[in-house]
Image (tube, rainbow, N blue to C red):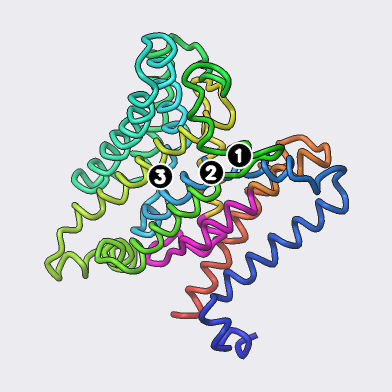
Amino acid sequence: MYQIKQNPLIKKIGFNRIVLCLVLLIMYGFFALFAKNFVSYNRLLSAMNYAYFLGFLALGVTFVIATGGIDFSIGPVMFCAAIMSGYLLTHYKWPLWVCLITSIVIGMLYGTLNGYLVAYKDVPSFITSMAIMQMSKGIASVFTKAQSVSWPQLAQENGWYRNLIKIKVGNTYLPIGLFILLGVAIICSIVLNKTKIGRYFLCLGSNKEAVRLSGVDVKKWQMLAYIICGTMAGIAAIFFVAAYTTVQPGYGDQYNNEAIAGCVMGGTSMAGGLASISGTFIGVMIISILQEGILAIGLNKNYQLVITGLIVIVAVYLDVMSRRRKN
């Protein structure tokens, strides 16, 4: 195994990425064999609908986990941004483009509050994110009077935003959302691996005190990671409503776990200091295929929760063992 990992080609691609791709292929093959009508373009499009918003959540939280923090509020923040901006669109008749920007701004504001409390007030990220999770649920319910909000369909006025996920060309649909998500993932990878910002994020996760003693304003960079995460949650809200239309207040918790599972599965260490955007992207695809495959087999969606939980446990355990070997 050691000799395989030391192969120049495998080292360049990344052993973990290769394993993830194999897991994705094996999982797809399993569902193709045992799930009726799983191998179809419509099934793949349905899985991609799930991957779009989950991908943005996972990319955002990757930056936070890289600094050694955590954010359990991203799912409810996404729902809060989607339902509040949707309420402004349907009840107050705000222009659609303003509502889309408002969704991003709402996510950014939650991320800013979260980052400020963690970076400047030294409140543990676990506590702040749990508090903001509850706040976002409550604010969304109060703002909409506990009503669900339905965004316009494609054929309706202002329905053009749904072209963000797929466009009909002839008799088929092109998954535009996949290209957008992939483009954003490439940008995130460049930021994390090729810029000063990314190096600071990773160094904060490795040894925050050493970074501080070297003269870096650690509070500013730590806060920025949460702002990026919140902004990504606001963008995820747009892709969620583009795929599923209706949003209800008080939901979103499940997507926290799935986004974090995608990060950890992809090689991002929960201890901080080590992150992989490409791994996160593949991890999100695995979770999306998993949920679609479970539904195709005819099992209850709760089975996905069980499997996702097991994936997180295994991934974190492998990360802990890997760090022990290195030490």
Q: In the orientation shown, which residue stands out farthest toward the bottom?
A: 3
Compare residues 198 and 167 and report the one nearer the observer: 167
Q: Position of residue 27 (x, y in %)?
A: 75, 57
Q: What's under tag 2, amino acid-wise?
A: Gly
Count residues near mark 2 (Cα–Cα under 10 Å), then give few for <14, some for 14-19, many for 20+. Answer: many
Q: Is residue 311 above or below residue 82?
A: below
Let me know if residue 272 is in the magenta part. Answer: yes
Count residues near mark 3 (Cα–Cα under 10 Å), then give few for <14, some for 14-19, many for 20+. Answer: many
| Residues at discs 2 and 1 in contact (Cβ within 8 Å) | yes
Instruction: Work out how far the residue at label 3 is from the one at label 1, CA to CA, in angstroms.
Output: 23 Å
Q: Residue at x 49, y 20 (%)?
A: 249
Q: Residue at x 43, y 64 (%)?
A: 275
**Mark 1 highlights which residue?**
49
Task: Say left or right for 118 vs 79.
Answer: left
Q: Earlier in the sequence, mark 2 or mark 1?
A: 1
Q: Position of residue 18 (x, y in %)?
A: 62, 71
Let me know if residue 62 is in the magenta part. Answer: no
**Mark 3 highlights which residue?**
71
Q: Residue at x 40, y 44 (%)?
A: 71
Instruction: Work out how far the residue at label 3 is from the one at label 2, CA to CA, in angstroms.
Output: 24 Å
Image quadrant in which you'd find residue 81:
top left
Q: In the orientation shown, which residue stands out farthest toward the left?
A: 215
- Residue bounds of the magenta highlight: 263-287
Q: Position of residue 265 (x, y in %)?
A: 57, 59
**Mark 2 highlights which residue?**
177
Instruction: Work out how far the residue at label 2 is from the one at label 1, CA to CA, in angstroms.
Output: 8 Å
Secondary structure category for the residue under label 2: helix
Q: Position of residue 281 (x, y in %)?
A: 53, 56
Compare residues 230 and 115 and report the one nearer the observer: 230
Screen quadrant of the C terminus: bottom left
